[in-house]
Amino acid sequence: MKNNHMNSVLSIFNQKGLRVTPQRLAIYHYLKQSYSHPTVEMIYNDLKEKLPNISVTTIYNNLKVFKYAGLVKELTFGDNSSRFETDTSEHCHVICQKCDEISDLDHPLLEEFREYAVNNSNYNIYFQSFIFYGLCENCKNEKLLQN
């Protein structure tokens, strides 16, 4: 990790009262660099060579700590596997129905829509999830080539 990035991560961990371990640093760094919204298994498969003593349980436990500290967001899309990201801001997701790629999508009206839900329902709104499904650019081009 570059020194500025490392100092930033150490500062974040310090602010959140998190103990710094090599596994914790590697998992968080991996998530910060990933735009694929990885599962625990994906993280494990990508880190096991670099950290041979890491386990799926270690990754899962650290993700729970990160989630509790507000450093990551856990995403569930109904496929029985959680995905994780470090972008904890409110945003939408677009999922490819063929390859399962997940992309972020920001929209300026999200806050307006949330306020509408709060003001026009009898619910306390704790979070919202907006998901769009379709074909990513690669799968769309692949489909065009097959026709």
Image (spheres, rainbow, N blue to C red):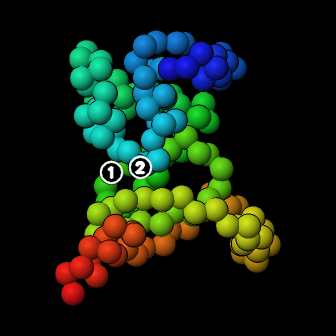
7 or 73, nearer to the observer: 7
Q: Residue at x 73, y 67 (%)?
A: 108
Q: Quadrant of the C terminus?
A: bottom left
Residue 1 in percent (x, y) is at 50, 20
Which residue corresponds to the image point at 47% horizontal and 47% vertical from the top-left? 35
What is the residue that sits farthest to the front in this orientation?
145
Instruction: Give the percent coordinates (x, y) of residue 75.
Output: 46, 52
60 shown above or below 143: above
Camera-near label (1 vs 2) is 2
Residue 143, compared with residue 131, is above or below; it is below
Q: Position of residue 118 (x, y in %)?
A: 75, 68
Secondary structure beneath disc 1?
A: loop
Residue drawn at x 67%, y 67% as measured from the top left: 107
> Horizontally, is 133 left or right of 145 in the view?
right
The local crowd at label 1, few if under 14, some if 14 to 19, many if 20 or more residues have their Cα within 10 Å, is few
| Distance between the alpha carbons at the discs numbered 1 and 2 | 14 Å
- First reached walking from the N terminus: tag 1 or tag 2: 2
Which is more toward the observer, 142 or 91? Answer: 142
The quarter of the picture where residue 15 lies is top right
At numbered mark 2, what does the secondary structure look like: helix, strand or loop? Answer: loop
Q: Is residue 34 left or right of residue 112?
A: left
Amino acid carrying label 1: it is Ser
Disc 2 residue type (three-letter): Ser
Q: Which mark is residue 81?
A: 1
Q: Is residue 78 visible?
A: yes
Is 14 or 117 nearer to us in this picture? Answer: 14
Mark 2 lies on residue: 36
Q: Is residue 13 visible?
A: no
Please report the residue visible at 24 percent of the width from the left and 17 percent of the height from the top: 52
